[in-house]
Amino acid sequence: MFSRAGQQLSGSFYLAGAQIGGFCPFRASTSIKPFIPAHLPFLLSLPLRSILTQPRTVTDTTTQTPNESYYEGLRHTDAGVFAAIYTEFRKPVTQAISAAGGSSADGSTFFRVAVIHAASLAQAQKLDESIPAFELLKNLAEAHFRDWAQEKNVELPSPAPVAEAEPVSQIELPDAEARHEFRQIIRAKRQFTRLEPACQKTVQELAKDAAINIADPRLHNDKTEACREKYRKTLGLSPEDWPDPLPTWAITALSNEPFQRSWSAAEAIESRLAMGLPAIPRKQSNVTRYVLIGLGLALLGFGIWSYLHPTISPKEVYDENFKPPTSIMADRSARFAKDTLPEARVELCEQLFEQADGYYKSGDYKDAADVLYTLLSGETEQCKSDACFYLAIIALQLEQPGITVEYLAKIPDLERFGEDLYWYQALAFVKLAAQNTMRRDVARRAVERARSNTEIPERRVQAEKMLEQLKD
């Protein structure tokens, strides 16, 4: 099932971190090395028997592109059309999901699912292209969201009653079973990207062979089985639910070229949005380039001036706002209670987290880090996300904010941590600014990101106060 969005953490600008491996970075023997960072076959047979009747809860957008152009662009995975769809429809669809009881993060996630699903349907000639593209995407996103909420037992408010004079959209969509299968395809692709490159290559070869009903004997070895097992665990499936070589929906996710192109087109736009850039790149003239160069020089000069004339101490800002959890286990329990897609708990992981928590609560942060570090590989690899998160917090406790940024950037399952990632990342940059006042501007931008992505009123107030204190 497609994971709940918290979720792709739009606006984040995580720096490429250090390679985690070999030694615990909090010990004298630290050795951290920096690094730089056919149509869908199952859709051809899907019955379109689900009729979704929804009121127009969002005012229609002004369509700047003819409807036929949207569908043609989806069918041929035109990057410009994908960007135009994001620019025009992402916000109102997100608002529609919020009106249905979801968060803005849910809206962003299920809009993306709807865009990729609509592209797959267009490629399979399974769309009524007389339907306005906005209405299709809105209804498809809402249907996926409601399916997901029902599967996860998330209670949603009842739909608002439809006024008699209000126009109603009646749109034929793939039925619930087909929508569920498509979310499985999305999930298979998303989890696949979390495998190490060597296993990605092996698993993709298996999928491509299975798609054309062949089996390469060279792939029948222990290495292949180990990669299949890692992929199964990443997807959270039991051995009984894991066919040989892969589930049908995973084969589609990893071998179907139209789906791959649609995924990549959406991924490229999401990456731009995550960096605070518009979906459609703006063309730059020479004048713009010279202006940017001039601004860069001005900022450099101003940074030097700030270094020579410091005002409010970033250290004071950091000390006032860094309030780490008092217990790793208590914080994890609170996080699991809120997580609608909790990971299966592994007994060995829990034992090691308990051990680390004992050291953590007594202030023995280096010993706690040693224990957490063992969770980053081997049999406990699925616990890597939590381990990275608490290692990042411990790094702040040990006055090593650079390592905090690195560990936050290495978390495989970012969406599970939501706005906490922005918050601790911002504090890490504030701490870096305390060590080097030339980084004050970077700290401000990080705090601005945290403020814009928090739904906790207290944090918003804290962030605004931090921004005021960090003014040059």
Image (spheres, rainbow, N blue to C red):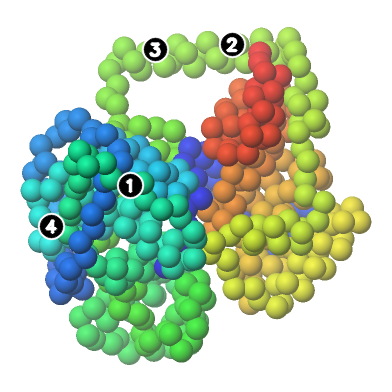
Q: Position of residue 126 (x, y in %)?
A: 12, 62
**Is there a contact, CB below 8 Å, between mark 3 and mark 1?**
no
Residue in the picture at 59% in, 73% down: 344
Q: Mark 1 points at which residue?
A: 161
Judge depth for marks 4 and 2 and give the one in front.
4
Q: Is mark 3 on a helix, strand or loop?
A: helix
| Left or right for 12, reference 371 | left
Which of the marked residues, 3 or 4, is nearer the chain's N terminus? Answer: 4
Residue 92 percent coordinates (x, y): 32, 38
Q: Which residue lies furthest to the front in this view?
A: 164
Label whose residue precedes the other's in the sequence (2 or 3): 3
* Viewer-nearest of discs 3 and 4: 4
Q: Which of 329 and 38 is in front in this view?
A: 329
Q: Residue 301 carries which label?
A: 2
Q: What element carries label 4?
A: loop
Residue 340 rendering spot, x and y as whole percentages: 54, 61
N-term-proximal mark, 1 vs 2: 1
Front-lying residue, 96 or 187: 96
For residue 338, side relative to residue 310 (left or right): left
The mark lying in front, picked from 1 and 2, is 1
Q: Name the kind of residue labelled 2 in the image.
A: Gly
Q: Which of 119 and 252 is in front in this view?
A: 119
Q: Distance between the residues labelled 4 and 1?
A: 28 Å
Residue under label 4, please give it.
127
Q: Residue 176 is drawn in which quadrant?
A: bottom left
Residue at (33, 47) in percent of width and height: 161
Residue marked by disc 3: 291
Distance in Å between CA atoms under marks 3 and 4 = 46 Å
Quadrant placement of the N terminus: bottom left
Alpha carbon distance from label 2 to label 3:
15 Å
Alpha-carbon span between mark 4 and mark 2 = 57 Å
Position of residue 185 relative to residue 166, above or below, is below
